[in-house]
Structures are given as C-alpha cells and as structure tokens.
Image (cartoon, grey):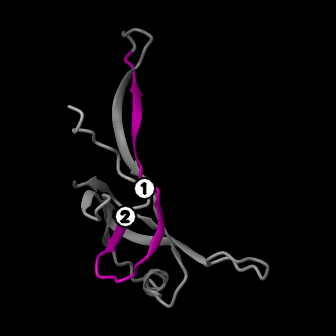
C-alpha cells in the first residue's frame, strides 16, 4: 500500500544514558560492533575443506564524543579507574524518530573507561572543543 512506507532512522537523532551519570550532549557515538571468531577444524580423513566452528565473540570499544563544557563526570569516572577503582556501568544508546520518541535501543554491558582524549586547541581555529572517551565492555544487546 502507498501509505505503508517505512524509512530508516536518522543517525543524528539519539541520546545516551549512562547509569548514574548526568553527562549530556554527545555529538557522536561509535564502535558498535561484535565479531565472532571462526575456528577451522579438519580431521585427517575428511575432504580438503575444513569445517568452520564458532569461536569467541569480541566486542569493539564504544567511543563517546562531546563538546567540552563544565561537566567532568566522565573524566572523573576515568580517574577513579586510574586510581584502581574500576566501576562498571551499563551504557544505553537510544535512536529517536522524527517526533523524538525512542525507536531502537542498544545496551552496552559492564562498560568502563579505557581511554580519554582532551580537546585540541588552536589559536587560529573557530571550532568547538571536543572531548572523547572510549569504553571497553563485555557485551552489547539490541533491546528494541
């Protein structure tokens, strides 16, 4: 039917929830990936093509980027990890539709910060100063 068109979601309408943190205004989220290793196996009496078995699942690190402001919660979380207190949290990334309603959700499980990048400053520039933080985690689930 002509009225049943379904468009894909836009990549610029999203929000991020970090368990217990109030940091807001992320410009970019990247690193959503899961890779399943392949184990090749062959017995001596089989044909020359090996069997392929599933191996370990590996998840890419999630990266958040935001315009530098007075908020230091993510940096303070990283600093706690540097000092030996690794607190793991759930990060939820939510895609929004044109009306601002939640339409797709991914949960990043047992995440903790592993890398931080301070902004680059340039006396001749006029761009926004961005901070970046990268999280290792133990799983990713699409929940909606």
Q: Which mark is residue 11?
A: 1
Q: Are marks 1 and 2 in contact (CB under 8 Å)?
A: yes
Q: Categorize mark 1 by other alpha carbons within 10 Å: few (<14), some (14-19), many (20+).
A: few
- Residue at 40% over, 54% down: 10
Quadrant assignment for the C terminus: bottom left
**Residue 38 found in image quarter:** top left
**Residue 18 found in image quarter:** bottom left
- The answer to whether residue 20 is magenta is yes
Q: Categorize mark 2 by other alpha carbons within 10 Å: few (<14), some (14-19), many (20+).
A: many
**In this rendering, would 10 be left or right of 119?**
left
Q: Can you see residue 117?
A: no
- The answer to whether residue 36 is magenta is yes
Q: Position of residue 94 (x, y in %)?
A: 31, 62
- Residue at 22% over, 38% down: 4
Quadrant assignment for the N terminus: top left
**In this rendering, would 36 be left or right of 109?**
right
**Residue 121 found in image quarter:** bottom right
- Give above or below for 97 relative to 55: below
- Residue at 34% over, 59% down: 138
Q: Position of residue 69 (x, y in %)?
A: 52, 86
Tell how many labels.
2
Q: Can you see residue 37?
A: yes
Q: Position of residue 130 (x, y in %)?
A: 58, 75
**In this rendering, would 40 be left or right of 1?**
right
Q: Secondary structure at mark 1?
A: loop
Q: Which mark is residue 14?
A: 2
Q: Secondary structure at mark 2?
A: strand
Residue range corresponding to the magenta coloring: 15-43
């Amino acid at each position: 039917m002509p009225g049943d068109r379904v468009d894909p979601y836009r990549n610029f309408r999203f929000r991020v929830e970090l368990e217990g943190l109030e940091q807001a205004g992320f410009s970019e989220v990247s690193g959503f990936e899961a890779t399943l290793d392949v184990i090749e196996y062959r017995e001596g009496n089989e044909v020359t093509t090996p069997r392929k078995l599933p191996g370990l699942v590996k998840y890419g690190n999630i990266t958040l980027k935001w315009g530098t402001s007075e908020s230091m919660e993510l940096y303070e979380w990283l600093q706690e990890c540097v000092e030996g207190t690794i607190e793991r949290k759930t990060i939820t990334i939510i895609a929004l539709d044109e009306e601002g309603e939640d339409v797709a959700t991914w949960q990043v499980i047992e995440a903790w910060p592993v890398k931080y990048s301070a902004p680059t400053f340039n006396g001749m520039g006029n761009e926004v100063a961005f901070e970046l933080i990268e999280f290792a985690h133990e799983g990713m689930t699409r929940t909606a």
